[in-house]
């Protein structure tokens, strides 16, 4: 994306870097934090298809961090066609949040930004709390003060909550299940959850918590266990790698497809009244079962390749997550479309193709087999 840097610079000055279609006065406007992440990219596609204008807040990075949304980006020189606009901001910078709210004047705000890696949150707990907990509070406060200043009381807010908040409370977990967080990340998500409830009760803000169980996709970050496995399956199958180092294989997760889950986020904001909802497949599998399906799909035995490495064990583990999403299914009419095996195979298929492209670069001497682009 050769022109991106320039366009972002002009965007942060003028408030308009653009993509995807002509503006109309009655078009809904969404503001997404975390637009460059897995969920941000699927939610942006979903909202663009619904006719929204989508504004994303992105943080400054020394490398481009927009890989997941490059395919829907339109050069700002074609600004009249653009319906996705990117702006520099950060959840640690309250002034940037308020400024973009005032400029963009969104109808819906989706707070997806987070230091979202549970294991990493033990390494950088202070930062994790600042972004995940206080970051959500900063954004809620920016929305509240924007409404107070402008009277735009119809704004709706979505908070990306997590099944990690349930932690050690046994399954099935629903909206009525007590939280028992097991990491700085999970404790921070609990704080963000209660800030959201509090702003709803104290100020009448239309604010919803989506308590989403794990959701994956070919766009999942490569250091989450599902993608780490499917990347390794692709590379082992193509001959670029032979071992895969993992931690606890007995943890059980309720894994769904991210594309299905972003729809639930939107549905929550289309209701008459704001509320909190669990979103889950209601099916749970261990990491070992994920390995069986992923390696088995391409005719490999995971036991020939997986090596247990203590460094991937966590100081406190979440053993068993399995959601009860009956409220979302009944009230929102949501249900998942992609099942466990289909999800694993979708991810393996994409990662086989990615490994083939890597192999071409390795064979041509442009890349080391150890290196990953
Ligand atoms: P990702 O880790 O893929 O994306 C996180 C996003 O947050 C990225 O866009 C990242 O930017 C951005 N971000 C990180 N720190 C900051 C900051 N200080 N200021 C602004 N932006 C920041 O997460 P997912 O897409 O998987 O998840 C989306 C949200 O949902 C997260 O809040 C996560 O905790 C939560 N969640 C996720 C679940 C899942 O299974 N995926 C389940 C339940 C909850 P950059 O690209 O620059 O790193
Ligand atoms: P999780 O996802 O912690 O559930 O958080 P992750 O994929 O990181 O771990 C799932 C389980 O796999 C075990 N595991 C490993 N995990 C990683 N990352 N790497 C390994 O090598 C490995 N080996 C075993 C873990 O111990 C764990 O039990 C995700 C994130 O998206 C959060 O942001 C989100 O809130 C929750 O899902 C719901």
Image: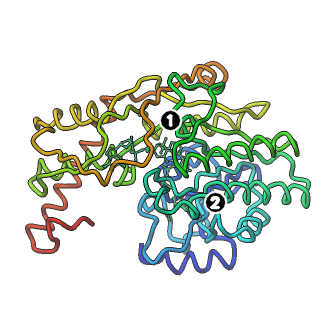
Q: Quadrant of residue 65?
A: bottom left
Where is the N terminus found, in terms of image quarters? bottom left
Q: Is residue 272 left or right of residue 112?
A: right
- Please, which colouring scheme is shown? rainbow
Where is the C terminus found, in terms of image quarters? bottom left
Residue sitting nearer the eye, 137 or 105: 137
Q: Is residue 21 visible?
A: no
Residue sitting nearer the eye, 373 or 312: 312
Residue at x 26%, y 34% (from the top left corner): 288
Please state the horizontal and vertical placement of residue 371, each as a whole percent of the image: 21, 68
The verdict on label 1 being within 8 Å of ligand 2 is yes
Q: Is residue 162 left or right of residue 237?
A: right
Q: Which mark is residue 55?
A: 2
Q: Is residue 198 left or right of residue 330?
A: right
Q: Which mark is residue 213?
A: 1
Q: Earlier in the sequence, mark 1 or mark 2?
A: 2
Element under disc 2:
strand
Which of discs 1 and 2 lies nearer the camera? The answer is 1
Q: Is residue 95 above or below residue 158?
A: below
Q: Is residue 117 above or below residue 251?
A: below
Please state the horizontal and vertical placement of residue 340, each as a whole percent of the image: 35, 29
**Few, some or many residues within 10 Å of mark 1 (<14, 14–19, 20+):** many
Please state the horizontal and vertical placement of residue 132, each as a whole percent of the image: 61, 55
Please state the horizontal and vertical placement of residue 323, each as a whole percent of the image: 51, 26
Residue at x 26%, y 45% (from the top left corner): 230
Q: Is residue 112 visible?
A: yes
Q: Is residue 175 above or below residue 137?
A: above
């Amino acid at each position: 994306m050769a022109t991106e840097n320039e366009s972002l610079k002009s965007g942060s000055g003028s408030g308009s870097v653009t993509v995807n279609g002509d503006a109309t006065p009655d078009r809904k406007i969404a503001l997404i934090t975390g637009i460059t992440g897995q969920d941000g990219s699927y939610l942006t596609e979903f909202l663009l298809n619904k006719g929204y204008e989508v504004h994303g807040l992105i943080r400054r990075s020394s490398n481009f961090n927009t890989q997941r949304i490059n395919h829907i980006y339109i050069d700002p020189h074609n600004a009249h066609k653009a319906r996705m606009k990117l702006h520099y901001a950060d959840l640690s910078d309250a002034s940037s949040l308020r400024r973009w709210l005032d400029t963009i004047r969104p109808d819906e705000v989706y707070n997806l930004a987070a230091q979202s890696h549970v294991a990493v949150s033990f390494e950088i707990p202070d930062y994790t709390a600042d972004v995940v907990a206080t970051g959500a509070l900063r954004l809620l406060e920016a929305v509240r003060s924007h409404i107070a200043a402008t009277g735009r009381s119809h704004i709706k807010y979505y908070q990306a909550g997590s099944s990690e908040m349930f932690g050690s409370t046994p399954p099935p977990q629903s909206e009525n299940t007590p939280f028992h967080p097991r990491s700085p990340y999970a404790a921070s998500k609990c704080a963000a959850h209660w800030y959201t409830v509090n702003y709803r009760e104290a100020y009448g803000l239309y604010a919803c918590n989506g308590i989403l169980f794990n959701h994956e996709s070919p766009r999942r970050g490569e250091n989450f266990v599902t993608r780490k496995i499917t990347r390794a399956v692709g590379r082992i199958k193509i001959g670029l790698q032979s071992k895969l180092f993992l931690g606890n294989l007995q943890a059980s997760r309720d894994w769904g497809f991210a594309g299905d889950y972003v729809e639930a986020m939107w549905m929550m904001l289309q209701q008459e009244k704001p509320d909190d909802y669990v979103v889950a497949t209601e099916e749970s599998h261990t990491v070992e079962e994920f390995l069986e399906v992923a390696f088995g799909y391409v005719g490999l035995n995971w036991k020939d390749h997986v090596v247990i490495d203590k460094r991937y064990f966590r100081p406190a583990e979440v053993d068993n997550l399995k959601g009860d999403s009956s409220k979302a299914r009944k009230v929102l009419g949501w249900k998942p479309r992609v099942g466990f095996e289909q999800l694993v195979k979708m991810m393996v298929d994409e990662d086989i193709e990615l490994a083939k492209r890597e192999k071409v670069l390795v064979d041509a001497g442009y890349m080391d087999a150890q290196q990953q682009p």
